[in-house]
Amino acid sequence: MTPAPAATTAPATTTVAPLVITGCGVVSPAGHGLTPLTSAGGPHAADLDAIGGDFPPVALAAAPDLRVAESLGTKGIRSLDRTTLLALVAAHNALAGLGAPLADAERARTGVVIGSSTGSVRSSSEFSRETLVRDKPYLVRANRFPSAVMNFCAGQLAIWNSLRGVNATIADGRVSGLAAVRYARNAIARGRVDRALVGAAEELCAESAWAWHHSGALAPGAAVGEGAAVFVVETPGAAAAAGRTPLAELLACEVGTPGSGGMRTSLAGCVDRALRRSGVPASDVGVVSLGATGIRGLRAAEEDAVRTVLGGPPPHRIRPAARLGESYSASGALQIAALLAAWHAPDAADAVDAAEGPAAVVTSLGDDGHAGCLVMRRPQPASTGH
């Protein structure tokens, strides 16, 4: 592989306007919120009776009680699929963490960008199956159609929270979470919205579990997981005007498609471009949040690409999938959440000291060669002055 140019030559200042995360909501096999992500234990065992379906003989990691009624009430939730419920609960917690509800004028300028594989795999699979097995003229149940559409989740997030800005669903396999961040950054930079709910969601269901089982893509002992992480992302100025405290700065986010050099070169190029655009030298990177932990052949490729650009392994590495299972399109968003937990929980198993470097890299790599990299930084005292 041809090494990517060293990131230590990055410019001294960022070439893209930083954004900030001011709210965070997480539902994962570890539990609700950031705190469970800091524990050293494994995920909760899957409650297959609650999920339903005939699962293959593979390890499974499911989110515990979703607390749907507690977060959303009981009205209008019966028709919602599990992907949407995961995202709605995470979004509710992210908005609740702002301290005060968004004003109506703010909601008009708030968008939704959600990363997804294909929406609810179960809903689309069941609806498609009915077109084959039910009597002519293929009398499918019409009430199942809305949740079978890929952008159903993003639409519901906007409806439930009265958000009237840009609404987008990004389907880019395992890179979907980071691709959603990039899309939201561009929408905010172009003035289409002032802030956005950004994240990704993936449900555990028998259909996707069987796909993992038959593909043989999971490494031995890796679990099929699920989860959702949703963040309130906005400009530093908007956060300061509303009195919201940033949890982290989002600098550059790059995504790429495979080229002739292969997946290592694809990811190394993303990392290098992101560091250069963010103005962060390799020496400032104290932690990397890795995603391809449980996928055969990808773990080594991901780590090789990071070492190529940084000139060696970073001081600290976080591998959320080792505890949460393989959550596919939600993996990037959960990696961001795990990094926030490491920064903000001093007693965390993956706690990262500020002396190890103020910046972090979140990487994502799919077996199709698609790659992504997000550069984040601990909140700076003067960050609201950008």
Image (cartoon, helix red, strand yellow):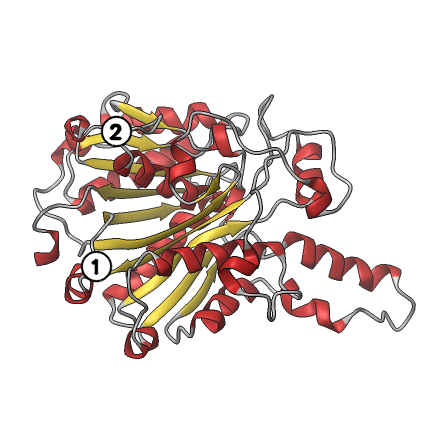
Which residue is labeled 1 in the image?
Answer: 244
Q: Is residue 66 above or below residue 81?
A: above
Q: Nearer the viewer, residue 286 or 118?
A: 286
Which quadrant is the N terminus positioned in? top left
**Residue 119 visible in the snapshot:** yes
Which residue is labeled 2 in the image?
Answer: 352
Q: Is residue 127 above or below residue 205?
A: below
Under mark 2, the amino acid is Val
Q: Secondary structure at mark 2?
A: loop
Q: Picture coordinates of residue 71 (x, y %)?
A: 49, 59
Q: Picture coordinates of residue 121 (x, y %)?
A: 65, 52
The reply to whether dot 2 and dot 1 touch (C-beta < 8 Å) is no
Disc 2 crowd rating (10 Å Cα; few below 14, some 14-19, many 20+) is many
Say which residue appears at 68% left-offset and 58% top-offset: 123
Where residue 122 is drawn, which disc sits there?
none
Q: Nearer the viewer, residue 46 or 191?
A: 46
